[in-house]
Every structure is written in C-alpha cells, then in structure tokens.
Amino acid sequence: AYQPQPAHKFTFGLWTISNRGRDPFGEPVRDPLPPNDAVAMLGDVGAWGVNLHDNDLVPIDATAAERDRIVREFKAAMQQHGVVCPMATVSLFTDPIFKDGAFTANDPQVRAYAVQKTMGAMDLGAELGATIFVLWGGREGTETDACRRPDDAVKRLREAVNYLCEYNIAQGYQYRFAMEAKPNEPRGDIYMSTTGSYLGFIPTLDHPDMVGVNPEVAHETMAGLNFTHAVGQAWDAGKLFHIDLNDQNPGRYDQDFRFGAANPRAAFFLVKFLEDVGYAGPRHFDAHAYRTEDYEGVKAFARGCMRTYLILKEKAARWNADAEIQAIVKAAHGDGANLGPFSADSARALANREFDRKAIAAPGLAYEQLDQLTTEILLGVR
Ligand code: 3MF
Ligand code: MG
Ligand code: MG
C-alpha cells in the first residue's frame, strides 16, 4: 500500500532533491548532487518524473558541445532509471542580470535576453520530452515602486509571453505554458501575486488557450489564502495545467516543506479535490528536505511527499464512501432546482416568489459533525 506508481504521476524538480540547504544565513549543508545521480535517486524512491530549470542541468555558460554532451548523458540516465521529464522551466532569477526582473525589467536588453534564454530552455525541455513549460516570475517585482509603473510591467510580461507562444507554434513544440504566482520572495513584492492574478491576465494574451497556471501550496499560503479555492477556480477555468505541492505555515519565510508537513488537513481537502475532479496532470513536489538532513534524509523527504499524498487519497475515498458523512453532505446541499437561465418570465417569477427567511435560516447545517467526522478519518479512528 502507498507504493508510488507511474500512474500517480509523481514528479520532483531537479532543484528540489538537489537542494543543498543553503539559506540566507547559512552555507550549504549537503554536497552537490549531480543531475544524473538525482535521477537515479528519483528512480530509487519510485518517482515517475523529473522537472528542471535549464541551469539545473546545463550551466549558464556551457558551450554548445558541453550542452549536447550533458543532455545526451542525462537522457541516458533518465532511460536507465525509468524517469520521464514532463515539465521544463527556466531560471530567470539566479543570474545577476535578472536583479531587476526578466520579462519586466526596465532594461530592454535584459528583457530580450530573458526571452532568448527561455527559448533555449524550451528547446532543452522539448528534447527531454516535456510538454508543460512553467513560467515563474521570481524576480518580476519590486522593492520600491518608484522604479516603474505596475501596468507597464503587465504590458511587458504580456509581450514576452505572446512572443514565446509564437515561438512554441513556430517550433511545433506543442507546449502548454503554466504560469506560477507567488506574492513575495525573493523580491519584496512580486507582480502577479496570486493564481487569481494570472487567471485575469491569461485572457488578455494572443493565445489564451496555450496558457494556464501552476499554483503552489506555499505561494498561496504565504499570501494568506486558501490554496484549494485557488485550485478550484483554476480547474473551473480549464487552466489547471500543472501543480506545485509542498507545505507552508502562513506568515513565515518560503518554507517549501514536505507535502502535508504543516497542514495535513488542508492537504487532505486539496488531494480530495484533485482526485474527485479527476485532475490528470503531474503531481509535482516543489519542496525540499530540512537543512538538518543528509541525502538519506532527502530520500525520506521524497518518499514522504508521495506516501502522504497516497494516504490522503485513500482517506478521501474513505470520506466519499462514508454513509454518515454523505448523508450530512446531501442534506447540506438542499433539494430543488438551481436558478436556471434568465428570462423575463423567470425574473418576474423570482421577483414574486415568497421566501420564509426565518424557516430557511432555522435549521443547523451539521457542519460541526461533518468536520468532526472528517477529523476522525484523518486521525485514523474512522
Ligand atoms: C519558488 C518556486 C520555483 C518555481 C520554479 C518552477 C524554484 O518559490 O516555487 O522553484 O516553482 O522556478 O518554475
Ligand atoms: Mg515555491
Ligand atoms: Mg514552485
């Protein structure tokens, strides 16, 4: 039981298990883990896939010949360990050139370089078999809003994404882009701070069908929001192209904890949602092991992410099959038809309909009992 299978589509970023535990106050605690060894580790723990930024694999100053050798050897490692690459992304935040942003930077040379670098990362991902391309605007933001107008940033971002969509078409890559929101860190404030911001931005693009979102548990939680609600809205819009699973306590630094480590209850409602609606994309863990760990601890971290997901999936099935829970849910949803389409007749009928406010408001909804039963399932006594 709880054994990860390819059908579960569990993936990890190369940057997640290779994370060396550097933080703003401390040096790395783990030795570098070469990409091919990381792939071996992912195969070992039973993950389905690996995702990567261009420079997780290919150093930013590699020659074309070095790049080709690295990619060739990486593909061989993927093959050997039975690991696929469904998603690729680009680092537009590590190099100092991006200190004032990438697509939204004030310097047009930086903006052009950012698009060039992303095109290269798309080439790389396509070579590895990726069909999803994530864009996280890590440095698209400000410390001081004196530097530019925020609507100019939106226009520049739109220009860049439109350009990349055209490149996608011209190259015949068939990528779907997934935009990842985050409210802050590393910038003081990042543009497109929530998944909802991107859901508003996407319809303004030239190829809106090609672009969706990549919501992340930690990012929405850092903004103090309910992650599952954001995911629900993305799903409803047909825009849930990818998802970043991890965990986070509100009001803290960007923690990237093991999935379910901070708020297993929220994780339960998330897994239940994804499984109930039949989300078919990768379950990507964008998290890393505590700084206290060696690489055995990293493996425990990776296994833990997947195991917790599968445990919560089983709990969700148990919840759905629980007669007492379902009776409360059914009662809570009420009987009778929805509002129905607007017409002059239906509006007149609605205007004249009588509502017994007191009687309607009188019964309790039994959500206390519903929640307690949920808790008991989660705590393993039901
Ligand atoms: C930062 C993130 C990023 C993105 C990654 C993928 C380094 O908080 O979540 O991880 O997920 O860049 O595009
Ligand atoms: Mg993150
Ligand atoms: Mg992420």
Image: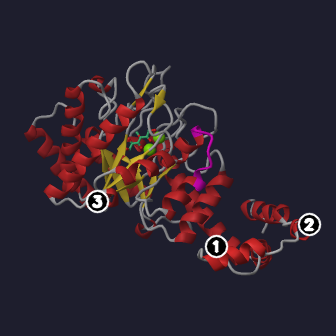
Q: Which residue is mark 1?
A: 317
Image quarter of residue 136: top left
**Which label lies toward us, 2 or 1?**
2
Q: What distance separates the C-alpha of mark 2 from that of mark 1?
A: 37 Å
Q: Is residue 99 left or right of residue 4?
A: left
Q: Position of residue 221 (x, y in %)?
A: 59, 42
Q: What is the crowding at mark 3: few (fewer than 14 residues within 10 Å), some, or many (at least 20)?
A: some
Image quarter of residue 370: bottom right
**Amino acid type of the residue that numbered disc 1 sits on in the rendered structure:** Ala
* Lower position in the chain sequence, tag 2 or tag 1: 1
Q: Which mark is residue 358?
A: 2
Marks 2/1 in contact by CB < 8 Å: the verdict is no
State the residue in front, 336 or 131.
336
Question: Which residue is at a point 33% across and 23% down the rendered structure image?
Answer: 99
**Residue 227 included in the magenta stretch of the image:** yes
Instruction: Classify 23 as above or below 312.
Output: above
Residue 75 in sight in this render: no
Q: Which residue is mark 3?
A: 131
- The span picked out in magenta is 222-229
